[in-house]
Every structure is written in structure tokens, then in C-alpha cells.
Amino acid sequence: MTKLQLARLVWFTSIISITFVHGGRGETVKPIMTIEGGGPITFSPDGKRLAGAVPGKTWRPTDIKMWEVATGKEVLTMAGHTSNIWKMSFSPDGKRLVSNENYAVKFWDLEAAKEIRTFKMSAFTRSVVFTNEGKYIATGDDNGRLVLWDIEAARKVRAVAAHTDWIVDLAVSPDGQQLATASIDRTAKLWDLNTGKAISTLRGHDWYLSSLAMGPQGKRLVTGADDTTAKIWDLETGSELFTLRGHIDWVRRVAFSPDGKWIATSSNDKTVKLWDASTGKEVFTIAAHSDEVYGVKFSPDGRLLATASRDGVIKLWNVQSFVGAD
């Protein structure tokens, strides 16, 4: 069996049920939907669609697929990347998508389902995000540079030597005024998007950072790292509030729920954990996949949690089934 055949076989493999651990009790629960897909995942701003990366002509995740959240129906496929897709971000109006591979950022018109522009990168680029007004994107590269781009003018607005090593994730504050960066130099930083000036540096992880997410009011940040922990930070004071301990392998992705009550973390230990954001206490653990879980995302209305794994499966979970109606 070739690598491509093996990869596609895995992508069609789904897990029928999983174990949900809560307060020492084991209960059998099922995802409400299982989709062939993986890679980075993200919901459209209206929550009606979910985008993910899938294998293209090779086993690498180089194509983008989009599904209807309500039905799981595939609605479009877009090909054009030639290496792994690292991140994807919807424009605020949901009409465009930006994605990045090693040395390129691509823009997609979702109504036409086609690539409309490519920016070539001079350094390996692992992260990209739209700013809130949709006129700019920010990228982070392996030289530690944070770059702001004017999309229509196809030019750099600003480049900042933000970190001493790779930038691996970016997040924009809800008001669009600030941007957070995570790096393998073991720090996260908060930046003023208007001036490009650093506001604060967050130190505390013992190993490489892998991801971050901004709280819905822009006052808190959660970071995940290869030290197996996640941390919640107060952005107004720059202080660490809680360390989330429980995973036994690298924390790959982190997510804040839209109401700010919950934090989700995914890990190489094949689990997803949900935490109370106000106390830092673990609420539940799902043995969700058969391989590393490198994607986790709440839907914009907070009802659903999407997880993506190296096992080639995306799963949608009903958040209320774990946390109740609170």
C-alpha cells in the first residue's frame, strides 16, 4: 500500500464512540458528526461552515475543503497549495479565506471557490490571520518577524522583529486594536496593531509555545505549550492567572469559548480537555481520537466544539452535553 493509499484509508476511518471522563465517572458519548478531514480547522464567522485541510495529490494536507455544519455536506474544495497548510482564517464578512503554506500565503474567493492572490514569503511562515476590518492580514515567520500586510496594495505595511525564534500562532483582540503572538522562544507577546509597539511579554512556560487564543473581551489570553500545560493570562496586568495541568504530552491547540466560560485544549496525548476559565479547573476529558489532536475550535455561538486529528477525522461535539445548560 502506498503512502497516499494509506493516508486516504485513515481519512475514512471514524471512531464510533469514545469515553468521556467527568468527576471520576466514565460515560459513553458520541460526536454529533464525523467528517473526513483534518489539518487546521476554523468556523466561518456565521458558524454555518467549517473549513479544514485534506490531502491533495499527495498524502500532505494541501487542499482546503468546506462543509455545512448543519449537515456535514461538503460544499467546496480548493486546491493550490504545494506544501502543508499551517493556518487558515476567514475574513470578517466570511467571503474570503486566507491560508498559508511554508513560503506562501494564498487568498481565496469563497463564492467563486478559487484562488485570487498569492503573497510569496521570504521566510518560512507558520501563522496568518485576518485583522478585524478585513483590509489587512498579519503573518508570523521563523525569523521571529511579525508582518502586517495591506491586501489590496499587496505590500508590507510594517515588519517587526517580534521574537527571537519561530512565531507559531497569532490572535487578534475582539476590538481589533491588539494582536498576540506565540513563539518557540517560550514567550507570548501583546502588540498594539496601530503602532506596532509591544505592550507586554508573557513568560512562564518551560518549553516551546504552540498556540494561543484571545478571550472574547480581549482581557484574557490562553497559551498552550510543549511543556504539556496551558496557561491563562490577565492581559491588563500581564500576570499568569492559572496553569492548566492534566495532559501528558504536548498541548497542540487551545480555544476560548465565545462566552469566555470555557477553554478547550488538544494534545498529542490524543485527548481534548475542557477547563473552567474562571477557576482553571478541568471539567472533562474526551479520549476523542486515535492519534494526535492538532485542532480544536468552538463554533461562534458556542454550541459546538470541533476537533481535528492526525487520524484524518474531524469531529463535532455538542458542548452542552459536557457542561450542561450553564
Image (spheres, rainbow, N blue to C red):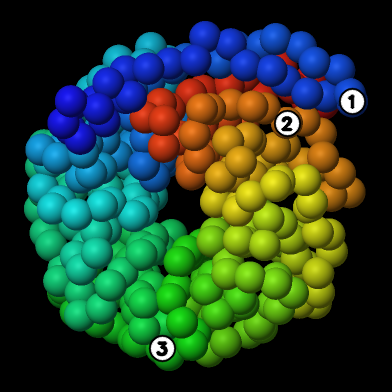
Q: Residue furthest front?
A: 1
- Label 1 belongs to which residue? 23
Query: Looking at the picture, which amino acid does disc 2 mark?
Result: Thr
Query: Looking at the picture, which amino acid does disc 3 mark?
Result: Val
Q: Are marks 2 and 3 in contact (CB under 8 Å)?
A: no
Left or right: residue 115 versus residue 6 is left
Could you tell me which secondary element the residue under label 2 belongs to? strand
Q: Which mark is residue 232?
A: none
Tell me which numbered mark, 1 or 3, is placed earlier along the sequence: 1
Image location (x, y in percent) of residue 283: 81, 34
Image quarter of the C terminus:
top right
Q: Are marks 1 and 3 in contact (CB under 8 Å)?
A: no
Residue depicted at 62% across the width and 77% down the height: 187
Q: Are marks 2 and 1 in contact (CB under 8 Å)?
A: no
Q: Is 45 situated above or below 316?
A: below
- Label 2 belongs to which residue? 285
Query: Looking at the picture, which amino acid does disc 1 mark?
Result: Gly
- Circle 1 packing at 10 Å, graded few (<14), some (14-19), many (20+), is few
Could you tell me which secondary element the residue under label 3 belongs to? strand
- Label 3 belongs to which residue? 160
Residue depicted at 47% across the width and 64% down the height: 169
